[in-house]
């Protein structure tokens, strides 16, 4: 992997980029330095045509154990506001390409919020995820009350945020918080396999599907249907539409160029 810092990245020949949080001595706790480096890494991939799908992961012990409280314990409201740390997760969420979070071990607090800024989640059976902020006198501040509720519903989100108790990977998958549940040792391989499948698809169609799902989720149904319809129509102007349909008729595998 490229870089020897808090975030490692590799762009593979198959169109899959693998981004790894690299602060193992702190269970990938999210200090400002790792947040900034992660945002810079993702921003650099936004317009890279060689990147068709991204896998974000940590290590076998932790995806990310949460915010680094040493940076917050003496901070006041104005200082927190001036950090504007939400912009770092927004960079991940705004990535045009599909992003898969591969979760082993702990994904707590900001770690789970980071995973929920991604588009798909592959989780290990033994993972532990949760929003424990209430236990230290605060609350989630980067999606833990909003993205979580949209993913698992009011009652599950209320229980997780109000008790601060973690749930297992098995429980997370059962309540709709993960796309795939696999044995712990298979998490990264399963995420990369899923990413390879997506990377083989026409990238413009993949990006428009992502945009329609995300933007449509918070829009009235009529407006969301209009967004979907316009995106559907626009894809008929692409070379990949012609290639895909021709390959289907000719019973061969399509070779999508992204044009």
Image (spheres, rainbow, N blue to C red):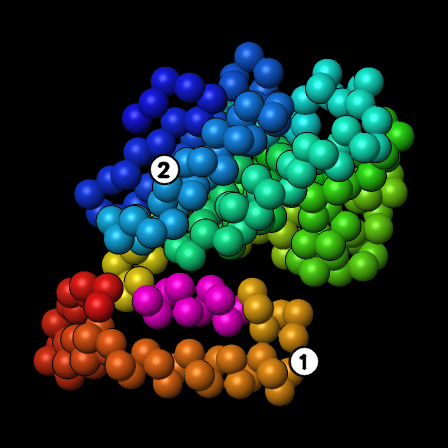
Kindly indicate whether the residue at mark 2 contacts the one at mark 1 (C-beta within 8 angstroms).
no
Q: Quadrant of the N terminus?
A: top left
Report the residue marked by disc 1.
220
Q: Is residue 14 above or below residue 21?
A: below
The 10 Å Cα crowd at callout 1, few under 14, some 14 to 19, many 20 or more, is few
Q: Quadrant of the C terminus?
A: bottom left
Report the residue marked by disc 2.
18
Horizontal and vertical percent position of residue 15: 26, 48
Residue 204 visible (yes or no) = yes
Main structural element of the magenta stretch: helix, strand or loop?
helix
Q: Looking at the image, which residue is at 66% across and 70% down?
A: 218
User: From the viewer's perspective, is 32 left or right of 183?
Assistant: right
Horizontal and vertical percent position of residue 150: 70, 60
Q: Is residue 42 above or below residue 258?
A: above
Horizontal and vertical percent position of residue 152: 71, 57
Q: Gap in Å between the C-alphas at discs 1 and 2?
A: 35 Å
The 10 Å Cα crowd at callout 2, few under 14, some 14 to 19, many 20 or more, is many
Q: Nearer the viewer, residue 101 or 77?
A: 77
Q: Looking at the image, which residue is at 52% across and 19% down?
A: 23
Q: How many marks?
A: 2
The magenta-colored residue range is 204-213
Q: Nearer the viewer, residue 87 or 103?
A: 87
Horizontal and vertical percent position of residue 105: 58, 29
User: From the viewer's perspective, is 217 left or right of 156?
Assistant: left
Which type of secondary structure does the marked residue at label 1 adopt? loop
Q: Looking at the image, which residue is at 68% across and 32% down?
A: 83
């Amino acid at each position: 992997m490229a870089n020897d810092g808090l975030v490692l990245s590799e762009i593979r020949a198959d169109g899959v980029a693998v981004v790894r949080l690299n602060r193992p001595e702190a269970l990938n706790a999210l200090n400002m330095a790792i947040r900034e480096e992660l945002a810079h890494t993702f921003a650099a991939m936004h317009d890279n045509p060689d990147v068709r799908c991204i896998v974000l992961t940590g290590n076998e012990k932790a995806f990310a154990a949460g915010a680094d409280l040493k940076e917050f314990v003496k901070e006041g409201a104005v200082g927190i506001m001036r950090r504007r740390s939400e912009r770092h997760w927004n960079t991940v969420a705004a990535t045009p390409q599909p992003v898969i979070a591969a979760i082993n071990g702990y994904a707590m607090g900001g770690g789970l919020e980071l995973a929920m800024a991604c588009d798909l989640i592959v989780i290990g059976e033994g993972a532990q995820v949760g929003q424990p902020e209430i236990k230290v006198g605060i609350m989630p501040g980067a999606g833990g009350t909003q993205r979580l509720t949209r993913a698992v519903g009011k009652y599950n989100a209320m229980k997780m945020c109000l008790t601060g108790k973690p749930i297992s990977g098995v429980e997370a998958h059962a309540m709709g918080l993960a796309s795939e549940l696999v044995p712990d040792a298979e998490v990264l391989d399963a995420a990369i396999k899923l990413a390879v499948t997506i990377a083989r698809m026409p990238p413009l169609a993949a990006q428009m599907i992502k945009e329609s799902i995300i933007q449509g989720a918070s829009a009235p149904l009529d407006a969301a249907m209009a967004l979907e319809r316009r995106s559907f129509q626009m894809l008929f102007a692409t070379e990949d539409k012609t290639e895909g349909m021709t390959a289907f008729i000719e019973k061969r595998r399509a070779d999508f160029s992204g044009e």
